[in-house]
Image: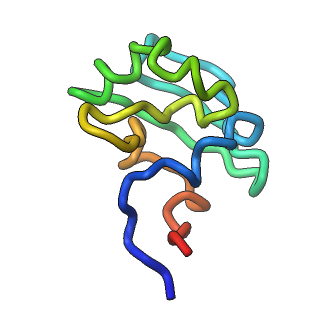
Amino acid sequence: MAEPCNQCGRCCLHMRRYMVIERSIGESQHFCYFTLTKERFFARIGGDDLVRFRDCESMSRYPDSCPFLRPRENEGFCCTIYSYRPEHCRRFFCA
């Protein structure tokens, strides 16, 4: 049975090669391509997520992770494009 997201980040720690930022408009808007499903989508980052996204160094221990994944303050991870994530990510359920 699928479990709700607990923000552990395990599903996104090896997604770098699948989540491609094709073009950026500033630091908050990105045209992306998800190679697994060949889906193109537009991602927008705002508010606290933009502050997190700017901190690229925080993910240096996870070079294969999705470029939009960032650590949470306490523990776990958060998706900085959660509202704009591709369909594949929307349908994913923890096993």
Q: Is residue 3 left or right of residue 52?
A: right
Instruction: Work out whether 18 lies above or below 8.
Output: above
Q: Is residue 76 left or right of residue 36?
A: left
Q: Is residue 60 left or right of residue 40?
A: left
Q: Residue 84, how many percent across, how many down?
A: 43, 46
Q: Residue 57, how many percent across, how many down?
A: 48, 12
Instruction: Work out whether 54 lies above or below 6.
Output: above
Q: Residue 60, how many percent across, how many down?
A: 57, 17
Q: Is residue 65 left or right of residue 91?
A: right
Q: Quadrant of the C terminus?
A: bottom right
Give the total number of marks visible in the rendering. Answer: 0
Camera-nearest residue between 52 and 19: 52
- Residue at x 28% of width, y 28% of height: 46
- Residue at x 40% of width, y 14% of height: 55
Camera-nearest residue between 4 and 51: 4
- Residue at x 49% of width, y 81% of height: 2
Indicate the quadrant where residue 78 lies.
top left
Q: Residue 67, how many percent across, how many down?
A: 57, 29
Camera-nearest residue between 29 and 73: 73
Instruction: Work out whether 40 lies above or below 22.
Output: below
- Residue at x 45% of width, y 24% of height: 29
Camera-nearest residue between 61 and 86: 61
